[in-house]
Image: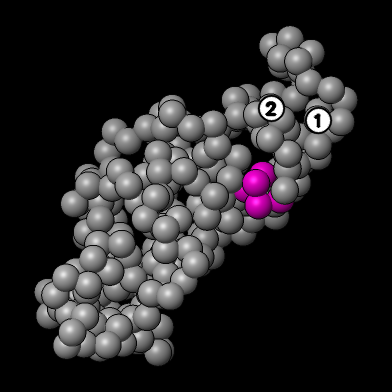
Amino acid sequence: MAQRRKVFGSAAAKVLFRRFDRETLRLAADFWRTIEQRRRLYVPEEEEEQTPFVRELEERIHEAFAGVTCHREVRVLIGGEAEDEYLPANAQALLAPLEERDDWRNIPDDLLAACSCSLSYAGPHAYRFLLPRFMIGALHGVVPFYPGHEPDSDLILHMRSQCTYLDEAQQACLSDYLNWEVGDTEVSERNRFLPWELDEYAATYASSLSYAEYGQLLLRRFRERTGGRAS
């Protein structure tokens, strides 16, 4: 990452910068300085001992998302945060070379924390690439991550699009993360759902259960399957 931090002053960058006007360069540089400041201010939380379930889930995430890359979308982690900051598209394009695209495990905690809003703006390829890093980051207290939406949310279609390329093992990791995240709070109420859960509800339970009751069913299944190891 040290090389990336110097990108705005590197000789190679000067050739690239000729394609952009001064205002675009200023916006991109100012944004990057903001990210670097956030990284310097990042202080890791003191971690509590992880439960056997959390250790197992982290292993499953590593296995399910092994080898996932992201070379088909311009906007990944940094670009997503830039979108959240309303940076124009040409300035975002200037930041694209800074993105990690080959191995999500290479994203450091301080950069993840500095770009904690980016996942909301990820396309389906970037979402699959960033998702394991956000789940593991959240398991370790680096970033907050609350997946899923309530059934009447206007973001359901966006969520479905983001989850397009998740396979069954990846979906299972996300469902278990959501069950853990909900069950890890004092109020264990499952009112957020993922696309495949909404599909199951519509196909099997819509005529017999409310969404609240279905949420409790999901939590009950999860607790029975994990045998209390998640708490």
Reply above or below: 147 against 184: above
Give the x, y percent position of residue 215: 27, 81
Residue at image location 42% in from the left, 58% down from the top: 157
* Residue 205 quadrant: bottom left
Q: Position of residue 161 (x, y in %)?
A: 39, 50
The residue positioned 48% from the left and 32% from the top of the image is 73
Query: What kind of element bears circle 1?
Result: helix
Question: For this rendering, which residue is in front, 45 or 189?
Answer: 189
- Is 189 part of what is drawn in magenta? no
Q: CA distance from mark 1 to mark 2?
A: 8 Å
Q: Which mark is residue 186?
A: none
Residue 41 seen by the camera: yes
Q: Position of residue 85 (x, y in %)?
A: 71, 50
Q: Is 84 inside the magenta-drawn segment?
A: yes
Q: Secondary structure at mark 2?
A: helix
At 33% from the left and 81% from the top, the residue drawn is 190
* Residue 229 seen by the camera: no
Task: Say which residue label 2 marks.
Answer: 94
Depth check, front residue: 88 or 38: 88
Check the picture and name the quadrant holding the C terminus.
bottom left
Marked residue nearer the N-terminal end (1 or 2): 1
Q: Residues within 10 Å of mark 1 (few under 14, many from 20)?
A: many
Residue wearing tag 1: 24
Q: Residue at x 46, y 71 (%)?
A: 153
**Residue farthest to the right, as pictured:** 22
Q: Which residues are magenta?
A: 81-85
Q: Nearer the viewer, residue 46 or 15?
A: 15
Answer whether labels 1 and 2 touch (C-beta < 8 Å).
Answer: yes
Residue in the foreground of this view, choosing between 136 and 217 = 217
Q: Residue furthest front?
A: 207
